[in-house]
Image (tube, rainbow, N blue to C red):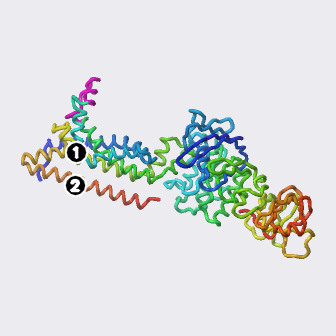
């Protein structure tokens, strides 16, 4: 399905100028600094700002074009905001059912029991809203949006009001939701780790404009990616997390490699993403001997980016084609005579299962 | 204390009717107006807000005078009404009803405006996304969350209309059963040196005003205490 948006919106010093077609499979992240127009774009898509000259189409559905305007309550969009969006005069159950009862019976694909189970909120149904923690509130908000069996889910920084611990609690639900509910998701985020964990596609925004639309893999493959602004370059490996082995570590298996993970006991086995910061990856020409670093992978150098601040980022490929970035000093790269095509060993000091 | 006379009862009944109709009409008008006022910061909104608040500062006689001119047989509104086969509105119940609606407008609009501003738009946007249309949103989200504002608006409007005097005297005169409301009757009694009758009715109004304000303040407190 494609979402087509065309909008020019000037308000005070801010200008939104967008004309794009977004392929909507899985999770699309709108990424950019605050004030770049992410939220405005989301509100235009939702029909919360009724502006002239805006065109919004989802697949064959025309939501806004010329004089035609479908109001939000007829668009069947699931909206989840940062915080405080549960209706305070209703219980958790009535909040969850508010949209469900207003959805035509024939359109209901998801039902209370399964959504409550998916989000782990079965035990909260009779509670009042003020008895919920921040994380529980966000899960109820997500569930409530899902129960309208929406055509599209719009999440406006759903995790940004939560502390790190709670974020960890919600992330798995979000990624499960993306894969199980079968609803395309557009998610606003300014946190690279959220994008890397959840997104399939990234829309980079800047000063009210869309800079580019890339798959996550493409976005992580270029050295100047805005996703690297905070923590430096990073790679994301997709694979399968397996049950803990005899040594107490958990294997993470890709078609070409196996990594050992410490901790992560609470994560169920299954598909997962690993985030590896380039500065945590070292390169060796020979297979390393006895050493404490557990994860050593044979890789092929694909590209060496020009040095910056005395360091270079070396893009390597695993046997299955997944990219792994290593950041080493320019001096090391020179003395080891690293060049594209060379077979080397990547030593990974630490990995994060992104949750 | 001697019982109230039939004329007193007639005035009480008339006053009650005037207050009730004014309150109903004003809630219907003030709700959309206050919603509009609370949903932006444009110049037009500021101007409208100032116009709505005018009766707070104008002497009631000024408002009453303009209304007499406009609604009377030679006024723009009065003449238009007569043209289409109706009667003008000076010295009639309908006339003082129009006057009351204008006069008490700020007491309905202000509390609602405050309640709607405090409510914000988030919950309403959420309800839209969940499939609720405009009326549905009003009854399932806005009304339950701003109930306190509605109670305050209704009580203040009712009580303020009860205390109306100058406007009615200017526009309605003192016609029994038509425009002679309690405040006017008390004035008539006092003018006629009929102090006993004036005392009795004044006491009724005093008690009523106190009870009304007591309700408003206790609702206000409870509403604040239960704010999420």
| Whether residue B13 is visible | no
Look at mark 2 in the image and give the residue it sits on.
B207
Left or right: A211, with A76 as reference point: right
The picture places residue B187, in percent across and down from the top left corner, at: 13, 46
Query: Residue at horizontal 90%, vertical 72%?
Result: A288
The residue shown at (66%, 41%) is A19
Q: Chain of mark 2?
A: B
Q: Is B5 situated above or below A327?
A: above
**Where residue B220 sits: x, y (%)?**
36, 57
- Residue A278 higher or lower than A222, as above or below: below
Query: Is B178 situated above or below A208?
Result: above
Q: Nearer the viewer, mark 2 or mark 1?
A: 1
Query: Disc 1: which chain?
Result: B
Q: Which type of secondary structure does the marked residue at label 2 adopt?
A: helix
Residue A320 relative to residue A271: left or right: right
Establish if A138 lies above or below B11: below
- Whether residue A265 appears in magenta in the rendering, the answer is no
Query: Label for residue B60?
Result: 1
Q: Position of residue A136 (x, y in %)?
A: 60, 60
Which quadrant does the C terminus of chain A fall into? bottom right
Q: CA distance from mark 2 to mark 1?
A: 24 Å
Magenta highlight range: B76-93
At mark 1, the secondary structure is helix
State the residue at coordinates (66%, 50%).
A205
For residue B79: magenta? yes
Q: Quadrant of residue A329?
A: bottom right
Quadrant of the rendering where the N terminus of chain A is positioned: top right
Q: Sequence order check: which comes first, mark 2 or mark 1?
A: 1
Q: Is residue B20 visible?
A: yes
A113 vs A333, left or right, is left
Neighbour class for label 1 at 10 Å: few (<14), some, many (≥20)? some
Instruction: Check disc 2: other Cα within 10 Å, few if <14, some if 14-19, many if 20+.
Output: few
């Amino acid at each position: 399905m494609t979402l087509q948006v065309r909008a020019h919106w000037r308000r005070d010093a801010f200008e939104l100028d967008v004309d794009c077609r977004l392929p909507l499979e899985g999770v699309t992240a709108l990424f950019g600094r605050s004030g770049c127009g992410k939220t405005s774009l989301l509100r235009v898509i939702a029909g919360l700002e009724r502006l002239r000259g805006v065109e919004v189409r989802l697949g064959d559905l025309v939501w806004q074009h010329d004089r035609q305007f479908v109001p939000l309550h007829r668009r069947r969009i699931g909206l989840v905001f940062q915080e405080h969006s549960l209706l305070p005069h209703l219980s958790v159950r009535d909040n969850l059912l508010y949209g469900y009862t207003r959805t035509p019976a024939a359109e209901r694909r998801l039902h209370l029991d399964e959504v409550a189970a998916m989000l782990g909120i079965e035990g909260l149904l009779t509670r009042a809203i003020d008895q919920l923690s921040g994380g529980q509130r966000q899960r109820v908000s997500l569930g409530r949006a899902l129960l309208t069996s929406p055509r599209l889910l719009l999440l406006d920084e759903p995790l940004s009001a939560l502390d790190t611990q709670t974020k960890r609690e919600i992330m798995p639900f979000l990624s499960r939701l993306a894969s199980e509910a079968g609803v395309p998701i557009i998610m606003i985020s300014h946190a690279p780790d959220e994008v890397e964990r959840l997104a399939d596609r990234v829309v980079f925004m800047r000063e009210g404009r869309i800079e580019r639309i890339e798959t996550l893999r493409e976005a992580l493959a270029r050295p100047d990616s805005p996703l690297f602004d905070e923590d430096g370059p990073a790679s994301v490996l997709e694979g399968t997390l397996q049950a803990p082995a005899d040594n107490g570590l958990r294997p993470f298996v890709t078609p070409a490699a196996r990594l050992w993970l410490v901790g992560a006991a609470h994560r169920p086995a299954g598909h997962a993403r690993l985030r590896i910061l380039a500065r945590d990856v070292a390169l060796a020409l020979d297979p390393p001997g006895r050493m404490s670093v557990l994860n050593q992978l044979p890789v092929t150098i694909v590209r060496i980016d020009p040095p910056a601040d005395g360091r270079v980022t070396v893009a390597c490929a695993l046997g299955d084609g997944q990219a792994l970035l290593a950041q080493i000093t320019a001096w090391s790269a020179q003395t080891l005579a690293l060049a594209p095509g060379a077979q080397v060993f990547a030593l990974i000091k630490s990995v994060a299962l992104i949750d | 204390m001697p019982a109230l006379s039939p004329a007193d009862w007639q005035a009480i009944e008339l006053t009650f009717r005037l207050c009730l109709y004014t309150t109903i009409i004003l809630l219907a008008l003030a709700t959309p107006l206050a919603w509009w006022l609370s949903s932006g910061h444009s110049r037009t909104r500021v101007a409208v807000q100032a116009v709505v608040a005018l009766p707070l500062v104008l002497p009631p006689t000024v408002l009453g005078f303009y209304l007499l001119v406009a609604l009377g047989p030679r006024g723009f509104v009065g003449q238009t009404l007569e043209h289409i086969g109706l009667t003008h509105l000076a010295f009639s119940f309908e006339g003082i009803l129009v006057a009351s609606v204008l006069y008490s407008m700020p007491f309905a609009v202000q509390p609602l405006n405050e309640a709607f501003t405090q409510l914000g738009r988030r919950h309403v946007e959420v309800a839209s996304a969940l499939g609720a249309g405009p009326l549905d949103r009003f009854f399932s989200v806005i009304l339950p969350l701003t109930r306190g504002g509605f109670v305050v608006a209704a009580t203040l409007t009712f009580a303020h209309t009860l205390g109306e005097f100058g406007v009615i005297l200017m526009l309605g005169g003192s016609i029994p059963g038509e425009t002679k409301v309690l405040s006017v009757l008390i004035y008539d009694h006092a003018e006629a040196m009929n102090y006993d009758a004036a005392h009795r009715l004044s006491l009724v109004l005093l008690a009523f005003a106190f009870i009304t304000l007591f309700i408003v303040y206790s609702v206000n407190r409870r509403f604040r205490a239960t704010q999420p």
